[in-house]
Amino acid sequence: MFGIIFLIILIVIAVALVGSYNSLVQLRVRCDSAWSDIDVQLKRRHDLIPNLVETVKGYATHEKGTFENIAKFRSQAMQATTPEGKAVAENQLTGALKSLFAVAENYPELKASEQFTQLQESLSQTEDAIQNSRRYYNAVVRDLNTKIQVFPTNILAGMFNFTPCQFFETTEADREPVAVKF
């Protein structure tokens, strides 16, 4: 009788451990998937920027510093690999894009250009998608990091080397929307 009760307790403990381990794995996979979604949206943004810059260059040829900053920050953003590094680089790129749109304000014929309007709309949609992807990623990171730190899963997480993920955070300057309407 005692042996059966002991066996049942062991089975319950084993099922709980397996369930906890599987939930940690699921959260890690969701975290990786959410990061991949952000990467896709950022790549789309990076692909739009050269077209936008070329369109503006046709009208504002003397704004060389703005174009150089965008190229530099775009390159840094594309080379960043960690969420923290990407966040910093993307925030710098967002600031440079704000400068580009400020330059475009001075050129009414540019604002009336159909190509510029289409690019501006695409960038606006991409910015929204990035924001949604970032929000989802940070929610999954929050869930994973919480699960890693709470008892008793923290013991299991430590045994199997689950580490907290970094949030994809913004700076104060990045919290302001990109001015894409004219």
Image (tube, helix red, strand yellow):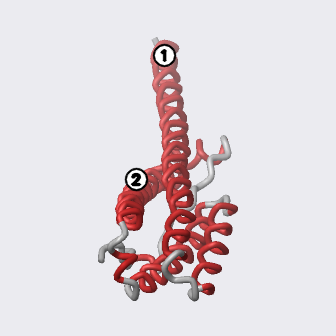
Q: Which residue is denoted by mark 2 in the rendering?
A: 136
Side of 94 relative to 162 (left or right): left
Picture quadrant of residue 77: bottom right
Residue 37 in the image: state x and y as whole percent: 49, 47
Q: Which residue is denoted by mark 1 in the rendering?
A: 2
- Residue drawn 54% across and 39% down? 29
> Which of these two is toward me, 80 or 83?
80
Residue 52 drawn above or below residue 36 = below
Image quarter hosting the C terminus: bottom left
Residue 66 in the image: state x and y as whole percent: 57, 83
Image quarter hosting the N terminus: top left
Residue 168 drawn above or below residue 154 = below
What is the three-letter code of the residue carrying label 2?
A: Tyr
Instruction: Determine whether the residue tagged by mark 2 lies in a helix, strand or loop.
Output: helix
* In this view, the mark in front (1 or 2): 2
Residue 3 visible here: yes
What is the three-letter code of the residue carrying label 1?
A: Phe
